[in-house]
Image: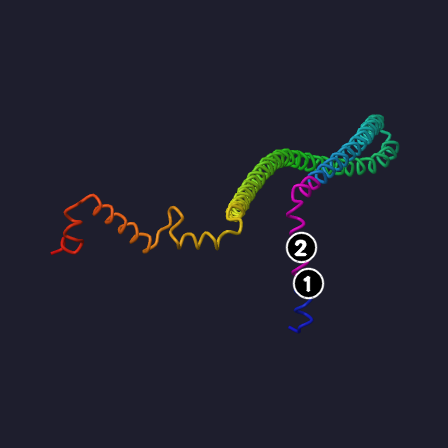
């Protein structure tokens, strides 16, 4: 197979798939049209049946006339033979012979009409029954499709609602994050405002031990030295012995 043939095959395959997709999407619409076509065909079949039945009735009436005429000729032949008038009987028989042939032919035509009528009547009854069942099934299919469409819509709304809920929660989290960042910036700005540019001075005061809550080794040692001096002042014996004697 050449490349050109393969490309043509590809196009035919794509066209078939596209056509099948269109048919699948419009299956119920196509089915409704097929039912309408079947109903139209059924109506036409009934019209054809009515025509055949009318033609059969016409042929039957003609046959009845010919049968009456044949009976009349037969009575004439019997009358002529009763009078021993064979010539007259022969003349009447010459009229009766083709009439009897027509009667035989007409009977065959009427029998053919009767067969056709029976066949059409049976086909119409069967088609009518099948159409009734098909309509019921189509109604069931339509109801099922309506229910499934409603279920799909509910599912889509539910899915969309969940999506919107997730989006709302994400938005809430972003707002909370932004508020936390803003609060942190405000707190930092407040601290900066309180410091008012005195950071260097406060550091020097803290190193000197002059700020409450700040301590250094020198300030701690100075506090203990002050406590020792106060103890010597209130203890006369330790003042006489001296500070070094108490460790001997």
| Label 1: few (<14), some (14–19) or many (≥20) C-alpha neighbours in 10 Å | few
Most common SS among magenta residues:
helix
Check disc 1 and report the residue beneath it: 11
The magenta region covers 11-34
Quarter of the image where one finds residue 92: top right
Residue toward you, 122 or 184: 184
Quarter of the image where one finds residue 48: top right
In the image, residue 136 above or below residue 187 = above
Q: Is residue 228 left or right of residue 176?
A: left
Check disc 2 and report the residue beneath it: 18
Quarter of the image with the C terminus in it = bottom left
User: Is disc 1 placed on a helix, strand or loop?
Assistant: helix
| Visual colour scheme | rainbow
Quarter of the image where one finds residue 162: top right
| Label 2: few (<14), some (14–19) or many (≥20) C-alpha neighbours in 10 Å | few
Residue drawn at point x = 71 percent, y = 41 percent: 33
The reply to whether the magenta stretch includes residue 115 is no
The reply to whether the magenta stretch includes residue 20 is yes
């Amino acid at each position: 197979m050449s490349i050109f043939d393969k490309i043509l095959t590809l196009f035919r395959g794509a066209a078939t798939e596209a056509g099948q997709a269109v048919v699948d999407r419009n299956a119920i619409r196509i089915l409704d049209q097929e039912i309408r076509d079947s109903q139209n065909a059924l109506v036409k079949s009934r019209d054809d049946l009515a025509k055949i039945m009318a033609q059969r009735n016409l042929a039957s009436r003609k046959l009845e006339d010919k049968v009456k005429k044949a009976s009349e000729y037969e009575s004439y032949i019997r009358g002529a033979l009763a009078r021993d008038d064979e010539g007259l009987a022969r003349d009447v028989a010459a009229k009766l012979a083709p009439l009897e042939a027509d009667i035989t032919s007409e009977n065959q035509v009427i029998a053919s009409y009767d067969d056709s009528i029976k066949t059409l009547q049976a086909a119409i009854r069967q088609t009518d029954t099948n159409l009734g069942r098909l309509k019921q099934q189509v109604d069931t299919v339509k109801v099922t499709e309506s229910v499934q469409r409603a279920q799909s819509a509910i599912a889509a709304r539910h899915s969309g609602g969940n999506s919107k809920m997730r989006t709302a929660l994400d938005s809430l989290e972003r707002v909370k994050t932004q508020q936390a960042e803003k609060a942190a910036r405000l707190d930092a700005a407040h601290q900066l405002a309180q410091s008012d540019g005195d950071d260097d001075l406060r550091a020097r005061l803290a190193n000197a031990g002059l700020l409450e809550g700040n301590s250094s080794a020198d300030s701690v040692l100075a506090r203990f030295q002050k406590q020792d001096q106060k103890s010597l002042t209130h203890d006369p014996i330790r003042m006489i012995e001296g500070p070094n004697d108490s460790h001997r």
